[in-house]
């Protein structure tokens, strides 16, 4: 029997080997701002547990490396990820000196690389399994529940990022909801304005190039510059329009952040609406007119349903982009997870940066998976043929 | 009856349709033939006002077609196009029901009509009704397209190269189906094509268009016998003329007295088919049978050859 290697498995195994044997597993710091000392897998975990993790990683890497059945690969990735998630918590309690509340234990590059390697394996398996959209959302929910369970169980409480969280539990959820409100609110506004604008651009050819070019230019303005540009007009509005200040409109704060996110969102929504409508088969459009549909009936009965998957793709781009971009809002007092990122940068406390960054990434990731599933569901039902 | 009076369409300086006048009798098929760019499709689209004419009037049963809003006019006129234009996101049954739904028919009446049309077109309503267009073959899609055009029982049906995308065998079948349905419903059909064969086969009258002008509008036999210009002559195809002329006549009209050996040919077959059969089998004569199977007489090569000659 010849031994056959899996192409992606070679990469995964190489990363896992480096991460487990060379890179540090956890970092120990005497307090939250001093530089850390690296701890390897064997140093970071109790006597019997370290070799156990090494064994799991080695077996998992071998399964990834060779051509093995999908079920085995799935099992290897899930077992490795669960083991890593639980053991990093154990490393936290093990490395913290008894009674010491200043010491900080955080996952180090080895841990993150191992997570990356086995997530890659899991993602590869899930892609090859060709899951239905519902199943993908199901996997997401299960993963979210598992992480939630670990958080509630207190397994990770000895890790630095959760110590930062414990100090800021109240503001974490407040900033979190502000973050989501900013991202979703600006998306909703962009859809409300962008869809009609896209339809207009589709119908009136003269407008199309002009509008899309303006939106393109807006897209290229750096976010900080855009905030700066918005201070003057919004400040003027707050000072001169009665009631505007009461609504929270000011030169800095949430209002300019909202406006900036809204402006950035317009291009994907408008452009995808135009592309989607242009992709409606000519014959279907002609038949719709020829059979006596009014313009409105044609728009809602034929063009819109057929363009919907493409428009939804634009909305997906906007949502993921907004969840990431909303981090910048903290710069001008707009709130959101960015608050922790910028505080952390200011205090050189990387754990605090992570407290802002990790939920942002997780939110964007989840939003992408859910919207991808929705897009696929609408697209398979309404398959557009190339007639 | 459709009366087209002095219809002209200009886009900026280009005249696409130039002062065309013609009358289409009720319950007949008029075929508009021409090369691409001859203005035949534009002329068709002005009848249901998908294109508004620059000048001239079109009357349907004596009424100016501008007396109704465009969309209401179009709901009363059937419309079928090349590549069928079915809505990919709607099922076959929903596609066929499009115009009845726009007209606000009640559900039971819509269902009855959809089932009737699907059965007429040999598509089982139970099996095919809930399917999506991309799950059908090309021929089935085309049938659904025509069924959809006929759904609201229109008196007039406009067809723009409806069979253009079909392979020859399915096209023949679709043409026969359309002729049968036209007889059954008595619909007035205006059909645009670039295929002279199709025009001769389908049309009660043929309108030949060239560069926006109506060059000749006459019965197929007359178009073949007396082409009005060199252009019509080319379109007809000089070497095809005698055979196209024969294809217009039925065998029963060419029957002579007497008997002949061999398998009988049915009286409603075309004379062209009879001649082909005679030439292929190398015989001078064929027996002819009526619809009831009774012998009617015979057709001869000599008789058919005389009929293929240019009419006086």
Image: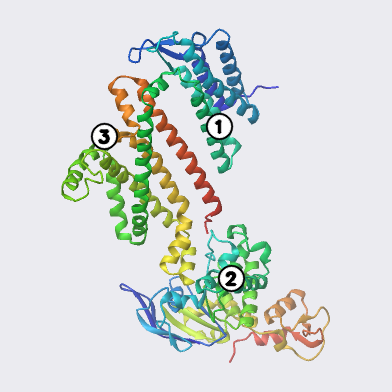
Q: Nearer the viewer, residue A272 or A143?
A: A143
- Closest to the camera, between mark 2 and mark 1, is 2
**Which quarter of the figure has residue B181?**
bottom right
Q: What residue would you read off at disc 3?
A: A333
> Could you say where residue A45 lies in the image, as x and y percent from the top left?
52, 11
Measured as percent of width and height from the top left, residue B66 is found at 40, 81
Q: Chain of mark 2?
A: B
Mark in the foreground, 3 or 1? 3
Give the vertical position of A129 relative to B39 (above or below). above
Using residue A218 as the reference point, say whether residue A165 is left or right of it.
right
Marks 3/1: CA distance? Answer: 40 Å
Above or below, B191 against A233 in this view is: below
Q: Which mark is residue A124?
A: 1
User: In the rendered image, which quarter is residue A135 located in?
Assistant: top right
Residue at numbered disc 2: B107
Question: Callout 3 environment at 10 Å: few (<14), some (14 to 19), or many (20+)?
Answer: some
Sequence-wise, the earlier of marks 3 and 1 is: 1
CA separation, marks 2 and 1? Answer: 49 Å
């Amino acid at each position: 029997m010849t031994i056959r290697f899996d192409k992606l498995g070679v990469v995964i195994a190489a990363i896992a080997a480096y991460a487990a044997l060379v890179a540090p597993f956890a970092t120990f710091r005497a307090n939250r701002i001093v530089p850390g000392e690296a701890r390897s897998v064997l140093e970071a975990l109790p006597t019997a547990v370290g070799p156990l993790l090494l064994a799991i990683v080695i077996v998992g890497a071998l399964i990834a490396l060779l051509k093995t059945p999908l079920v085995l690969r799935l099992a290897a990735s899930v077992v490795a990820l669960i083991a890593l998630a639980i053991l990093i918590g154990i490393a936290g309690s093990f490395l913290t000196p008894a009674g010491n509340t200043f010491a900080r234990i955080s996952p180090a590059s080895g841990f993150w690389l191992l997570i990356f390697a086995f997530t890659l394996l899991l993602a590869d398996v899930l892609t090859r399994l060709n899951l239905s959209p519902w199943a993908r959302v199901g996997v997401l929910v299960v993963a979210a529940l598992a992480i939630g369970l670990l958080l509630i169980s207190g397994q990770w409480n000895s890790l630095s990022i959760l110590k930062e969280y414990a100090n800021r539990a109240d503001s974490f959820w407040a900033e979190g909801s502000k973050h989501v409100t900013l991202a979703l609110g600006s998306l909703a506004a962009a859809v409300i304005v962008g869809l009609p604008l896209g339809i207009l651009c589709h119908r009136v050819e003269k407008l199309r190039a002009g509008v899309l070019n303006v939106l393109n230019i807006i897209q290229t303005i750096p976010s900080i510059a855009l905030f700066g540009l918005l201070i003057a007009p919004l400040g003027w509005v707050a000072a001169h329009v009665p009631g505007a200040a009461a609504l929270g409109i000011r030169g800095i704060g949430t209002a300019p952040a909202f406006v900036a996110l809204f402006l950035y969102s317009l291009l994907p929504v408008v452009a995808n609406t135009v592309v989607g409508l242009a992709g409606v088969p000519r014959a279907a459009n002609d038949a719709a007119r020829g059979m006596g549909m009014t313009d409105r009936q044609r728009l809602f009965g034929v063009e819109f349903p057929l363009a919907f998957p493409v428009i939804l793709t634009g909305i997906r781009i906007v949502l993921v982009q907004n969840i990431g971009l909303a981090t910048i809002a903290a710069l001008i007092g707009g709130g959101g997870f960015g608050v922790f990122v910028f505080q952390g940068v200011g205090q050189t406390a990387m754990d605090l940066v992570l407290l802002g960054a990790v939920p942002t990434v997780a939110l964007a990731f989840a939003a992408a998976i859910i919207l991808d599933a929705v897009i696929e569901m609408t697209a398979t039902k309404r398959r557009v043929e190339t007639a | 009856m459709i009366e087209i009076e002095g219809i002209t369409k200009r886009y900026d300086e280009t005249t696409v349709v130039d002062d065309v006048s013609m009358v289409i009798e009720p319950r007949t098929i008029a075929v508009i033939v021409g090369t691409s760019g001859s203005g035949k499709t534009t002329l068709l689209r002005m009848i249901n006002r998908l294109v508004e004419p620059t000048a001239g009037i079109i009357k349907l049963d004596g009424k100016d077609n501008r007396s109704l809003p465009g969309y209401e006019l179009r709901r009363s006129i059937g419309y079928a196009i090349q590549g069928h234009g079915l809505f990919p996101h709607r099922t076959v049954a929903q596609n066929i029901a499009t115009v009845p739904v726009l007209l606000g028919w009640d559900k039971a009446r819509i269902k009855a009509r959809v089932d009737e049309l699907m059965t007429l077109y040999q598509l089982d309503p139970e099996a095919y009704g809930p399917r999506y267009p991309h799950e059908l073959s090309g021929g089935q899609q085309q049938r659904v397209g025509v069924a959809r055009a006929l759904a609201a029982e229109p008196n007039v049906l406009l067809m723009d190269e409806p069979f253009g995308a079909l392979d020859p065998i399915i096209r023949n079948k679709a043409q026969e189906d359309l002729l049968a349905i036209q007889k059954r419903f008595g619909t007035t059909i205006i059909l645009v094509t670039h295929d002279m064969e199709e025009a001769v086969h389908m049309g009660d009258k043929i309108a030949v268009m060239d560069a926006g002008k109506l060059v000749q509008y006459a019965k197929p036999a007359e178009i073949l016998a007396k082409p009005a210009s060199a252009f019509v002559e080319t379109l007809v195809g000089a070497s095809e003329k005698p055979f196209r002329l024969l294809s217009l006549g039925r065998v029963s009209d060419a029957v002579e007295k007497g008997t002949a050996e061999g398998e009988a040919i049915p009286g409603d077959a075309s004379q062209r088919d009879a001649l082909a059969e005679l030439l292929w089998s190398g015989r001078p004569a064929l027996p002819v049978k009526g619809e009831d199977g009774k012998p009617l007489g015979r057709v001869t090569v000599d008789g058919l050859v005389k009929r293929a000659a240019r009419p006086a």
